[in-house]
Image (cartoon, grey):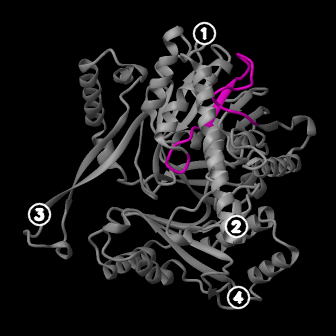
Amino acid sequence: MSLLHQYLTLIPRGLQTCVRQTIVDRLSSAGGGFQVKVEFVGEKDHGQSVENNLQSSYTKLWKEQQTIGRKSRKNLRDDIADACHLPVGSVSVTEKQQESSNQKDNNQAGKQKRQEQFVSIGYLQKNQPIWSCPGELQGTVWVKIETNCPVDIMANRLRFLGPLLTLINIWEQDKLLPTDQSLEQAIESMGMLVKKKGGQQKKDDDDGPNDPFISALHLWHKHVESSWNLSKDEMATIHSKIEGSEAMKYRLSCIRDASDKYLYTRQQFMGKMANIVLPYSKIPGGEAWKVDLTNYDLDVVLLARQHALAVGIALKPYRQLGVKGFATGHVAPDVNPPYLPVEVRSSVVRLRPATAHMLLSLAQLEPGDVVLDPCSGVGTIPMEVIFHEKTAVGIGGDVVLTPDGLGPVAASYAKDAHAIQRQQSNAASNAACADQFAWDATILPLRDSTVDAVVSDLPFGSQCLSRTKLERMLPLILSEMARVLRPQLGRLVLLCGDYKQVVQYLQQLNKSGDVIEMPCDSIIPVNIGGLQAWVVIARRGSSKVQGELVPNHRDRVRKLAGKRAHEQRCQKNEKTAKKRSIQS
């Protein structure tokens, strides 16, 4: 039996159940009878107060919705509960915490204090409650993967996984790193725990070493060879460092939850923990390793919660791509090929490829399905269709895909994506296809009932679109989605900032019949980059679209187009005037 490799990844809270099943399905379908074990770790006591208060939270949400509904049943906005199988919304869960002697003030010692934690509650597949919360590390679930799958399969078939680590070790214990503990107490307790329990030693095997750190290092080396696309000289340098003939350069990064509540800084904790979690300063028989915070080879990452600590090695080429990794103290972004240039990444707001792939998995695609993203931006979702295990057709478009806008960037991104897909595909006949177009999402140039699934990241947030503009455009965009979807067969998977607004407009489409099936199949709270968002999943009803679903649809589209053209002219004139002033 080949050696089981251990990985650790961070999944947005709310999608953990879907992702775990998808991991098993993808690796199991790869052939070869590979072993796959997926489990949630670092969850001991995490969110226990939420789970304990889940029923009361649902009751609170239900009463709020019913009270609003009794006040005014005439407004569809007040009937939001009718569009949900279970109560949905955000509530605050109050926790009681004991103050330590280090936190004493003028009040008496040991006084109970109350801390509010905001939690968003939704449901998955009609009847399964699910919750999420905002925050960098709080909003993620740690997923441990044990498998003997080859490295290339892990890199190609699990594109929906974001930051991926080769796991060195993990410790779970009640009150492992409580916030009321001093730095000296935390380091002492961690040192005793590591010394007492040590690492989970692997069994002797001909395929690799049995030391957890050295085994993780060799697994990192395999990923570098397989997916980092380094030059021959760079690879030769890595080989020599692995063999020990040259000094390996590394940096230690740390991410922790509730960082503002600890009595010591993240940097202080990280500096003291280096000698505990990294007892190996060199490869046996090789040169001593060197700390290099800029030009490092290895990024060793600490993930710290009050009840769990994990240490691993980052498997993504963050430094080589010029991307900010874990060193900033935040969860690193997923980086999957094709890569956008640095100057583009810094100026373009786009959906993470891993999130796009997860949304496609929620759409339950079948071979031959036509997948549409009417607000595709640079094309993350349409291009991820060609990497999906189901051979589908991806169509995307956006109003900004012009020669002066994101058109050249999107064209280059699509070209690179197709090139990578052809390299990975065993047969050209199995290659999926995807393309993008310049269009206005409020009036799509597509025939009725021609699309199997609409998967889209609707614009939200101040960086994408103002709330006023979104309120004008969203009913028109949703009505076009309903028009092009196949009756009874079409699916909607929408990532949005406010589920109420989306569900409200979907309800309004049903004035002319059963256009969208209500209640919605799923309304999932998810954590995207530390921010709270929602995934709304609904199905197309049986009614045919006759006429305009939104009153004066075309007139409203023309008015929006006129305003957009006016804004573009003003921006162009400002740039011209600024250029002339500089020249003068």
**Does the magenta-highlighted stretch encompass residue 454?**
yes
> In the orientation shown, which residue stands out farthest toward the front?
584
Q: Earlier in the sequence, mark 3 or mark 4?
A: 3
Judged from the image, the secondary structure of the residue bearing numbered disc 4 is: loop
Residue to which mark 4 is pinned: 247
Query: Is the magenta region chiefly helix, strand or loop?
Result: loop
Vertically, is 381 above or below 161?
above
Question: Circle 1 is placed at which residue position?
Answer: 542
Indicate whether 474 appears above or below 347: above
Of circles 3 and 1, the one toward us is 1
User: The residue tagged with tag 3: helix, strand or loop?
Assistant: loop
In this view, the mark in front (1 or 4):
1
Highlighted range, magenta: 438-464
Q: Mark 1 or mark 4, which has the lower sequence index?
A: 4
Q: Which residue is mark 2?
A: 317
Q: Position of residue 503 (x, y in %)?
A: 47, 26
Above or below, comparing residue 323 to residue 141 in the picture: below
Kindly identify the amino acid type of the residue bearing the numbered disc 3.
Lys
Rendered location of residue 252, percent (x, y): 55, 77
- Find residue 111 and name its label: 3
